[in-house]
Amino acid sequence: ERFDDGDVDDIRSMLFEARRNPSIDRIYFNGVSIPPSLPVIETGNLEALNRFMKNELGEGYYIAPLDRTEVVIDSNDRFQIHYNQETVDKISKKMASHLIEKVF
């Protein structure tokens, strides 16, 4: 299944509702880090999602994903979609660094 206009509408609707909520000050999106082993269709969908969110939120609120060469899937994951701990740690550090730079 492809990332399409219906998906875009759903995401825009969620963002609209979140922005209307007075208790939400800012919305950040951490781009999805895509493993090199992911099939072409899924890779395209996630790349499209990342581009959409970057355009929708802007540079300051979009946290870029890791480079594909840095993404490793957990070897014990039978679905081959979950990151290994080293990749999770890299993503966490990147998120923290971005938030510290932008918020504080």
Image (tube, rainbow, N blue to C red):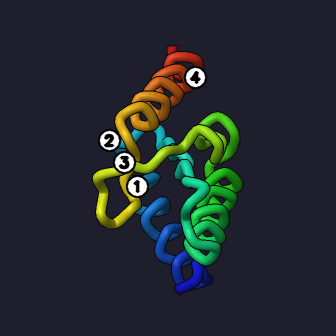
For residue 15, above or below residue 2 = above
Instruction: Name the residue furthest front.
Output: 75
Labelled disc at residue 102: 4
Secondary structure, mark 1, is helix
Quarter holding residue 66: top right
The local secondary structure at tag 3 comes to: loop
Residue 1 locus on image (x, y percent): 52, 86
Work out how far the residue at label 4 is from the one at label 3, CA to CA, in angstroms.
Answer: 31 Å
Q: Earlier in the sequence, mark 1 or mark 3?
A: 1
Q: Categorize mark 3 by other alpha carbons within 10 Å: few (<14), some (14-19), many (20+).
A: some
**Earlier residue among tags 3 and 2:** 2
Tag 1 residue: 18
User: For residue 74, which numbered disc appears in the image?
Assistant: 3
* Tag 4 near tag 3, CB within 8 Å: no
Dot 4 amino acid type: Lys
Label 3 and label 2: CA atoms lie apart by: 36 Å
Q: CA distance from mark 1 to mark 3?
A: 33 Å
First reached walking from the N terminus: tag 2 or tag 4 = 2
Depth check: give the residue in front, 74 or 46: 74
Q: Nearer the viewer, mark 1 or mark 4?
A: 4
Q: CA distance from mark 2 to mark 4?
A: 19 Å
For the point 30% across and 57% down, the residue is: 77
